Amino acid sequence: MDPVLTVTAVSILLGSLIAFAFFANYFGKRKSEVQSIAKSELQPDPKKQNKPSQSKKSHLKAHSHSHADKDQNKRHHPLDLNTLKGHGDSVTGLCFSPDARSLATACADGVVRIFKLDDASSKSFKFLRINLPAGGLPTAVVFSDDASSIVVASQTLNGSSLYLYGEEKPKASDETKQPKLPLPEIKWVHQKVHEKKAILTLVGTNASYGTADGSTIVVSCSEGTDIMLWHGRTGKILGNVDTNQLKNTMAAISPNGRFIAAAAFTADVKVWEVVYSKDGSVKEVSKAMQLKGHKSAVTWLCFTPNSEQIITASKDDSIRIWNINVRYHLDEDPKTLKMFPIPLHDSGGATLHYDRLSISPDGRILAATHGSTLQWLSVETGKVLDTADKAHDGDITWISWAPKAIPIGDGEALVLATASVDKKVKLWAAPSTH
């Protein structure tokens, strides 16, 4: 072959190889750049990525703030007067003083608080704090004689105890200083009562029936079958009864101190009479009558203010009003005066049974609860006067009417108090009965 042609061919071949290598490298870089651009679009720069995160955070904050605004601006139930806060745990019991100016609460944080109710619409309330002995959790409270002494039921690992706390007389430390505020001190105590069983209810009244001397009679009902009577001021045991009904639910005493009634495991309600001696002391507690008519267990009961009727709620979906002002000594049976269907139902139409009952001091309004729901009924007709579907953020543990009207602003009104596991106590105005 001609050397010139050979050199030329080799030159062309080398040039082609060089050109191929150059373009291969060029297009390889372009492909890499395209891939990196695509990746940058799928995985944004961290600096740019912070912006959506901040936007999302501010959105959540605004959303939360929006909910807070809604909660804050949410219209309260028209009967919701006030909330007593400051409890550190579930509020298990409450009780008004006889003059309705004090409200005592029992809380699972181990503290009994006595609030001063000078005005039910006040923004804040002063309260007296009573710390129970170590290990004791207050479960129920009831005033004894006046607002200066209170009986407290306490639960410990060793069983139930009852304490009477009374105010010590104020003492001046010296002539120039003002007297110290009275501090509560234990006046009497009974430990391991009810054979160590828990106390379900603790109620009391100033006995005024017959020859009764007006002393406070306290009734404690255990989770077993026994019920005990106590003298509020001295702590003396006045009597005890056995329901013989497997397990108690609750017990109540009539406002005049004549009768004690208990709701237990069965459909029948047993009633006992407290018999007083001529000197005003309790002579005995004797069986008086039974309320028969419900088809299923009675969940709660209460006496009317005149002590002549008992109102019962049952799992048979009914409410009954009984006349107990009968000559039971002559075998006259108590009669059902009225019977109403329970007007509370779930979304499926099933009747919801009442957990608690409390009647207003004028005898016209029956307050009833189921879980966190609160209803007011007309005692005359059984019709619903009002309902608070979610009165609390948890189950209601106790309800009680003030024994008389309480000041509210420039006026006064009947007030209902409710306690709950949500650590709050609420005050409610009475609905109109018209």
Image (cartoon, rainbow, N blue to C red):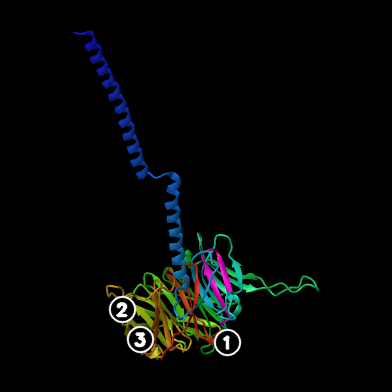
Disc 3: CA contacts within 10 A as few (<14), some (14-19) or many (>=20): some
Along the line of sight, which residue is nearer the eye, 229 or 330?
A: 229
Ranked by sequence position, the earlier of labels 3 and 1 is 3
Label 1, on which residue? 410
Residue drawn 44% across the image and 78% down it: 77
> Which is the main secondary structure of the residues drawn in magenta?
strand
Mark 2: which amino acid?
Asp
Disc 1: CA contacts within 10 A as few (<14), some (14-19) or many (>=20): few
Q: Which of the 4 image quarters holds residue 66?
A: bottom left
Ranked by sequence position, the earlier of labels 3 and 2 is 2
Task: Locate residue 183 relative to residue 229 in the image: left or right.
Answer: right
**Alpha carbon distance from label 3 to label 2:** 15 Å
Foreground disc of the pair 3, 2: 3
What secondary structure is marked by label 2?
loop
Mark 1: which amino acid?
Asp
Asked if the residue at tag 2 contacts the one at tag 1, i.e. Cβ–Cβ closer than 8 Å, the answer is no
Whether residue 220 is visible here, answered yes or no, is no
Label 3, on which residue? 383
What secondary structure is marked by label 3?
loop
Along the line of sight, which residue is nearer the eye, 415 or 360?
A: 415
Image quadrant where one finds the C terminus: bottom left
Along the line of sight, which residue is nearer the eye, 391 or 371?
A: 391
In the displayed structure, would residue 334 be above or below residue 244?
Answer: below
Region in magenta = 100-114
**Alpha carbon distance from label 3 to label 1:** 31 Å
Asked if the residue at tag 2 contacts the one at tag 3, i.e. Cβ–Cβ closer than 8 Å, the answer is no
**Alpha carbon distance from label 1 to label 2:** 41 Å
Q: Residue 121, position in %: x, y?
A: 55, 80
What secondary structure is marked by label 1?
loop
Image quadrant where one finds the N terminus: top left
Along the line of sight, which residue is nearer the eye, 337 or 284?
A: 337
Label 2, on which residue? 317
